[in-house]
């Protein structure tokens, strides 16, 4: 590639609006594709509950149905080994890997579900605390107002 050709490509690329990911800065609020201005993350208690509920349902379903093939696979692996087939070791290996992956996924689902419950409770506690502090300030203000009006 010649130098002139490289310069032309750079000039053309600079003139085009890129939709690629941009790191180390937030999108410009004037950018029409930039999403909501300010970039603040907002979530409601309903959102948290929905995520936690979905994670729990997945955990429950995987816990019940994720091991349906375990017994049959173990029996097949044992029978294949007994008949001298190396495939028995492979079936056992696959079943063992499945079990490890299933446990990892179950742990992740439980973690997500529990974390959503914790987050909901923590934020509810924060709301209670803030309400208490603000209420105390209002009560103090009333006391000062009563003193000045005497």
Image: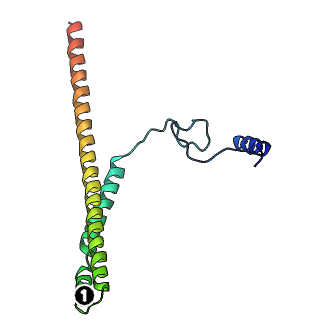
Q: Relative to the observer, which residue lies in front, 129 or 4?
A: 4
Q: In which quarter of the image is residue 133?
A: top left
Q: Quadrant of residue 14?
A: top right
Mark 1, other Cα within 10 Å: few <14 / some 14–19 / many ≥20? some
Q: What element carries label 1?
A: helix
| Residue 9 in sight in this render | yes
- Residue at the right extreme? 4
82 on left or right of 12? left
Residue displayed at 52% across by 41% down: 23
Quadrant in which the C terminus is drawn: top left
97 on left or right of 27? left
Q: Mark 1 points at which residue?
A: 81
- Above or below, 97 against 129 in this view is below
Rendering coords of residue 108 (x, y %): 29, 58
- Above or below, 61 against 32 in this view is below
Rendering coords of residue 123 (x, y %): 27, 41
Q: Quadrant of residue 66?
A: bottom left
Rendering coords of residue 32 (x, y %): 62, 42
Residue displayed at 26% across by 26% down: 134
């Amino acid at each position: 590639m010649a130098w002139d050709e490289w310069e032309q490509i750079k000039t053309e690329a600079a003139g085009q609006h890129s939709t690629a990911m941009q790191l180390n800065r937030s999108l410009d609020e004037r950018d029409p594709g930039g999403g909501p201005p300010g970039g603040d993350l907002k979530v409601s208690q309903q959102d948290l509950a929905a995520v936690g509920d979905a994670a729990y349902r997945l955990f429950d379903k995987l816990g019940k149905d994720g091991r349906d093939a375990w017994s049959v696979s173990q029996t097949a692996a044992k029978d294949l080994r007994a008949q001298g087939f190396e495939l028995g070791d492979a079936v056992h290996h696959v079943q063992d890997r499945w079990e490890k992956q299933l446990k990892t996924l179950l742990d992740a689902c439980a973690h997500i579900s529990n974390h959503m419950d914790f987050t909901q409770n923590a934020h509810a506690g924060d709301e209670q605390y803030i309400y208490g502090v603000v209420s105390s300030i209002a009560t103090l203000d009333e006391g000062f107002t009563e003193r000045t009006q005497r």
